[in-house]
Amino acid sequence: KMKNKLLEKASDGSFKLIFELEKSTDLKTFTRIPITVGSSFLNIGGQLEFTFSPTDNAAFYRVRGE
């Protein structure tokens, strides 16, 4: 379960970005999309890329980091 923060500061002064990806078919109920090893990487532009195959009729996706 998320810690309900987007950024977490460590005692050494570094920061950790914390978020999760979710999907929904109706914009009411969302379920988490697991990020597995090998499904995400940093591209040459420094952006995080995540690749996944839909397994249901989800039409809505969101990034959550509160």
Image: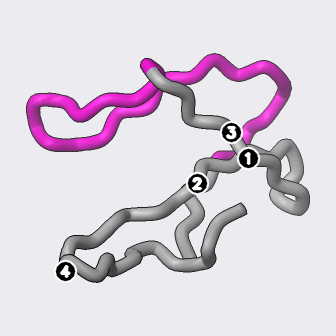
Q: Is residue 11 above or below residue 40?
A: below
- The quarter of the displayed image where residue 3 is located: bottom right
Q: How far is disc 1 from disc 4 in space, using C-alphas?
A: 29 Å
Q: Which label's residue is closer to the chain start, 3 or 2?
A: 2
Please give the residue where the numbered disc 4 appears in the rendered image.
Answer: 13
x and y percentages locating residue 66 in the rendered image: 57, 78
Marks 1 and 3 in Cβ contact (< 8 Å):
yes
Judging by the rendered image, the residue that carries numbered circle 1 is 32
Residue placed most toward the observer, 34 or 8: 8
Q: Amino acid at mark 4?
A: Gly
Alpha carbons under labels 1 and 2: distance apart:
7 Å
Element at label 1: strand
Label 2 element class: strand
Q: Check disc 3 and report the residue beneath it.
A: 33
Neighbor class of circle 4 (other Cα within 10 Å; few <14, some 14-19, many 20+) is few
Mark 4: which secondary structure? loop
Is the Cβ of the residue at disc 3 closer than 8 Å to that at disc 2?
Answer: yes
Characterize the local packing of mark 1: few (<14), some (14-19) or many (20 or more) Cα atoms within 10 angstroms. Answer: some
Relative to 24, 16 lies left or right: left
Percent x, y of residue 39: 47, 23
The mark lying in front, picked from 2 and 4, is: 4
- The three-letter code of the residue at mark 3 reads Ile
Q: Which numbered tag is attached to residue 20?
A: 2
Helix, strand or loop: magenta stretch: loop
Q: Residues within 10 Å of mark 2 (few under 14, many from 20)?
A: some
Task: Please tell me whether mark 3 sits on a helix, a strand or a loop.
Answer: strand
Looking at the rendered image, the disc whose residue lies closer to the viewer, 1 or 4, is: 4
Q: Which residues are magenta?
A: 38-61
Q: Residue at x 61, y 77 (%)?
A: 4
**Sequence order check: which comes first, mark 3 or mark 4?**
4
